[in-house]
Amino acid sequence: MSKSYSFPGFIDVHVHFRDPGVPEAETTASGLAAAARGGFAAVVTMPNTTPACDSPEQLQYQQVAAGNSTHQPTNPSTYKPTNPPTHQPPLLLPSACITKGRLGHEVANLEVLAEAGAAFFTDDGSYVADDKVMEEAMRRSATLGMCICEHAMDTKVQGEGVIRDCDLARIRHLPVIPASAETVAIRRDLSICRVTGCRLHIQHISTAEGVELVRAAQKEGLPVTAEATPHHLLLSCERIPRDDANYKMAPPLGNDEDRAELRRAVKEGVLMFATDHAPHPAAKKSLGFAASANGIIGLETAIPITWTVMVEGEGMDPDAWARAWWKMPRGILSPRAAARLDGAPQTTVEAGEWKVVEVSKFASLSRNCPYDGMEFNCWPNTAATTLVP
Ligand SMILES: [Zn+2]
């Protein structure tokens, strides 16, 4: 017997739609269909499109593509999802770059981007390596009351690494990324947060040491949050079954100790959830671990995985679990973006019945996902999704 739960609409604050850029991997329409099928009321798109989202025109392009605007799209998508949502599509809230062109050299026109509706600022996919650039961005963002989100992987420490130290890395002689790639970046950002007072969010945190830094910063009273992805909570580098790039992402999967610490921190309310949904065409993920692109799709398995791991596995309270999908993510959005969620549909889930993931049925255009055939015991009930009165 399954049990039904309804919550305020869930928000995924970390998705990559490849629009504009790589429409064969994901369009705005297919990405929103995947979000609807996954049980989400809203998503925040990352700005690493081509071109990068560092202008009001690019923010507007995404709004139009999502049907969130009264203007007609100049470049409409012709894609029709095979599994169309039965209710209003999820809201698309675009984020904008921290730096011009997402190149890390010069702070973008944050004031104009905030005015044009950016949900927050991030250079996701790249670390803002220049300390002075990041400090200027955080000072200006603090004045605007906007959050800076960081892809916390220090470029120099990461080097050519593609995986954390594990059996597969040793057997295949794969270059390793040390955990310190993340902690060096987080420490630097926390020190700038301390002097600027800027709201800081660490994206896709993956190491036990990184979690401890965030936990300590929150205790210190700094305005810092962080997110854990379903894959970092479910998988670990010590259990990658073979040289399969569907286990390759940035940051890489941590070890069992990292995974346990991430779960503990989610349960404590230190971390929220976000998917880092990262579609790629098959050709970019079939080149083995060393050469394939980073990232996996996650929108249509996020609720099943996080519930099964955290509520079923770790005994987390369902309401606390849900808050990590709606209340905590709301807190990193600009007030304007958060206000757009008023009246968004609720998220309803059915828990208690084990069902198998069938990747072939996904609404996403991409299939880079390691979960095919895995079983989880909670699923979004999109038919029961209702508008809040
Ligand atoms: Zn990232």
Image (tube, grey):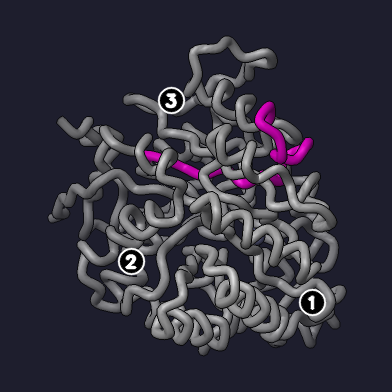
Q: Is residue 187 visible?
A: yes
Mark 3 secondary-structure assignment: loop
Q: Position of residue 242 (x, y in %)?
A: 69, 72
Task: Residue under label 3, please give it.
Answer: 84
User: Nearer the viewer's eye, disc 2 or disc 1?
Assistant: 1
Residue at 45%, 70% in the rendered image: 223
Quadrant in the rendering for residue 323: bottom left
Mark pair 3, 1: CA separation: 40 Å
Does 106 sit left or right of 247 as displayed? Answer: right
Residue 90: % across, % down: 41, 33
Q: Identify the residue position indicated by label 1 in the image.
A: 158
Categorize mark 2 by other alpha carbons within 10 Å: few (<14), some (14-19), many (20+): many
Report which residue position mark 2 lands on.
308
Which residue is located at x 40 percent, y 62 percent?
A: 305
Q: Position of residue 299 (x, y in %)?
A: 48, 48
Q: CA distance from mark 2 to mark 1?
A: 32 Å
Q: Are marks 2 and 1 in contact (CB under 8 Å)?
A: no
Of the 4 image quadrants, the one containing the C terminus is top left
Look at the image and give the residue range highlighted in magenta.
41-58
